[in-house]
Image (tube, rainbow, N blue to C red):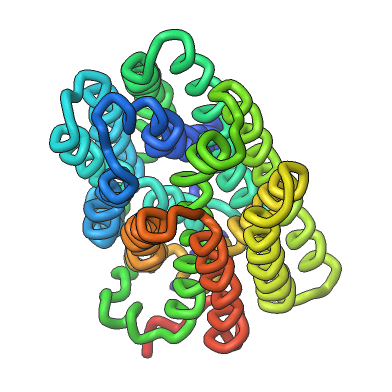
């Protein structure tokens, strides 16, 4: 079957599945970001230093990264719809049980459980999008996904911070974990037909092997962009609440409001970035011209915002955080849309398992490195500088390793 025939044969998924995927990514980032929102109180109650806190943040990524290729394989093996439901159930329970945790070790184990569950989100969502969404709409649809993943931290920081200020940090985990489980009801109902169809009519073309995927230079280009962009995004998620409270002197409520606005800026930039790129392509630009240009500029904007933040007064710091949100918001939809175009429906599940797994190594390294920098220097400045340098390095992946953005030939 040719690529064009596969494109024409895409089954209809109805109006609910794509919004539910965006909602799942929203929940995904609410639940993974709860620890950062609650960090000031958890650190005080459990008497954790910055390195221990960094270990708790990165523990999520230890299992998240390791499980990602397995999740990509499961998305091909048992279907993305079923894999998504299993993973969300696991991560929701991990969030819920964190509300009962008694110390460092128990939170560490639950963060690792959270990572296993959340590893399904991007391989499954990207496979579903690649199978059902036309290339001309990939920017807008992935912009919607990016809005979900950015509004999750906004909601978590703002409402979680307010709940925490009134009821304590444990109630945040109990509440968000229980609410997350409710997503399973509409998902199972709306995807029952699609799950049955997936197993009744398996893809006549087998998915490429991991070896074939790893041999493509384009994979490494997008993955380098993903890795470096994620380094900055994880830095903001993990350390912005502590930075605003401990360095800039904001209250918990003020931190929640500022953090919420930063993520809202990210969401607006992601939506506009995806829409503008789709329009640019519709007017005659190639996928490569549009997506690579926007991604390159976005990395540099994010790096500039990070360099602005630690220097000067409060006003410059806030401006820097907002500029950072714009940069990382702009690049987010293109990290996924570019991979979906290159891989095609046959390979997207495994491709995203590899790309997102490697891309999230920054979630392991970044929090640990930043924690050690803060412990040794007593300052966040070098943490911001290093993160800006890493973000800027992502430009190399987009410009040097991806010659064209078009579906790869998996016959060779």
Residue 18: percent from left, percent from top: 54, 39
Identified at 41% across, 51% down, the residue is 122
Taking the image as shown, residue 115 lies to the left or right of residue 330, namely left
- The quarter of the rendered structure image containing the N terminus is bottom left
The residue at 39%/19% (across/down) is 172
Q: Residue at x 53, y 86 (%)?
A: 401
Up the image or down, 51 lies above or below 210; here it is above
Residue 68: which quarter of the image?
bottom left
| Among the 4 quarters of the image, the one containing residue 194 | top left
Say whether residue 189 is visible. Answer: no
Q: Position of residue 342 (x, y in %)?
A: 51, 73
Q: Answer above or below: position of 398 versus 164.
A: below
The correct choice, above or below, for 27 with respect to 266 in the image is above
Q: Residue at x 70, y 42 (%)?
A: 265
Is residue 142 visible in the rendered structure shown here?
yes
Q: In which quadrant will I find the C terminus?
A: bottom left
Residue 397 position in % (x across, y down)? 54, 80
């Amino acid at each position: 079957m040719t690529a064009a025939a596969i494109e024409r044969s895409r089954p209809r998924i109805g109006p609910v599945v794509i919004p539910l995927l965006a909602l799942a990514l929203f929940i995904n980032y609410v639940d993974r970001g709860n620890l950062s929102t609650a960090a000031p109180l958890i650190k005080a109650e459990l008497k954790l230093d910055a390195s221990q806190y960094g270990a708790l943040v990165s523990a999520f990524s230890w299992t998240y990264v390791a499980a990602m290729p397995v999740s990509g394989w499961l998305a091909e093996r048992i279907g993305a719809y079923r894999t998504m439901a299993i993973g969300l159930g696991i991560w929701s329970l991990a969030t819920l049980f964190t509300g009962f945790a008694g110390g460092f070790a128990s939170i560490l184990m639950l963060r690792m459980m959270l990572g296993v569950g959340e590893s399904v989100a991007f391989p499954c969502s990207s496979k579903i999008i690649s199978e059902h969404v036309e290339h001309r709409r990939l920017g807008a649809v992935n912009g919607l996904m990016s809005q979900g993943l950015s509004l999750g931290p906004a909601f978590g920081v703002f409402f979680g911070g307010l709940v925490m200020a009134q009821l304590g940090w444990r109630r945040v985990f109990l509440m968000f974990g229980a609410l997350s489980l409710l997503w399973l009801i509409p998902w199972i109902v709306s995807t029952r037909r699609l799950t049955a169809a997936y197993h009744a009519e398996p893809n006549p073309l087998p998915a490429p092997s991991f070896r074939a995927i790893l041999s493509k230079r384009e994979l490494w280009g997008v993955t380098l962009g993903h890795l470096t962009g994620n380094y900055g995004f994880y830095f903001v998620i993990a350390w912005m609440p502590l930075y605003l409270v401990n360095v800039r002197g904001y209250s918990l409520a003020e931190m929640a409001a500022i953090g919420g606005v930063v993520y809202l800026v990210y969401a607006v930039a992601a939506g506009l970035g995806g829409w503008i790129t789709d329009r640019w392509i519709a007017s005659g630009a190639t996928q490569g011209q549009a997506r690579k240009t926007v991604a390159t500029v976005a990395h540099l904007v994010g790096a500039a915002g990070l360099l602005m933040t630690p220097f000067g007064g409060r006003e410059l710091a806030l401006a820097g955080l907002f500029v950072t949100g714009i940069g990382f918001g702009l690049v987010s939809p293109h990290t996924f849309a570019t991979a979906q175009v290159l891989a095609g429906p046959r390979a997207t599940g495994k491709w995203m398992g590899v790309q997102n797994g490697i891309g999230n190594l920054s979630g392991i390294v970044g929090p640990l490195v930043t924690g050690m920098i803060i412990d040794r220097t007593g300052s966040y400045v070098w943490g911001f500088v290093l993160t800006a340098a890493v973000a800027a390095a992502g430009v190399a992946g987009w410009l040097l390793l991806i010659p064209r953005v078009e579906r790869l030939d998996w016959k060779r």
